[in-house]
Amino acid sequence: MQRDLIQKNKEKLEKEQERLKKTLSGIATKDPNVKYDYNAKYKDFGDPIFDDSAEAAEEALYDSNISVEGNLELQLRDVSQALDRIKDDNYGKCVECRTEISGKRLEARPAAKYCLKCVKKIKHK
């Protein structure tokens, strides 16, 4: 695998990791006991008088944050694992069949962990 592609993707992945962590910290708190896990924050609008519309807005925001949080957690996991593979000198190798992932695929998706052959195989299971 080309060293310059690895270095370029490492920089992309590090920036993406920081962006994801920052975004997650705005809507969730990090679970110190579970790697890559965050817990969505419940925004209390602080209305001292019970108000159905405020309660509904709080619930809607929380539900939305849970959905976004889950998606961002998966992205953060994939990016962090790609950085771990770079560190372990396994970057660019399919985690399923151990063949080299094409440079074009890694340029398009730096966190890719499967070659296209294995992606197709996994999708058809």
Image: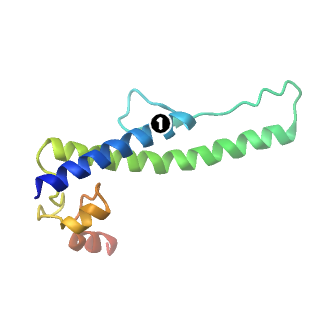
Q: Secondary structure at mark 1?
A: helix
Which residue is found at the position 86% from the left and 40% from the top? 52
Which residue is found at the position 38% from the left and 33% from the top? 34
Q: Amino acid at mark 1?
A: Lys
Which residue is found at the position 35% from the left and 35% from the top? 35
**Image quadrant of residue 109?**
bottom left
Please provide percent x and percent y for residue 5: 18, 56
Height in image: 99 above or below 37?
below
**Image quadrant of residue 31?**
top left
User: Is 60 positioned to the left or the right of 21 in the image?
Assistant: right
Quadrant, the N terminus: bottom left
Please provide percent x and percent y for residue 2: 11, 57
Please provide percent x and percent y for residue 16: 38, 46
User: Is 13 positioned to the left or the right of 5 in the image?
Assistant: right
Quadrant, the C terminus: bottom left
Which residue is found at the position 32% from the left and 75% from the top? 124
Q: Nearer the viewer, residue 82 or 7?
A: 7
- Write down the residue under mark 1: 22
User: Is 56 positioned to the left or the right of 120 in the image?
Assistant: right
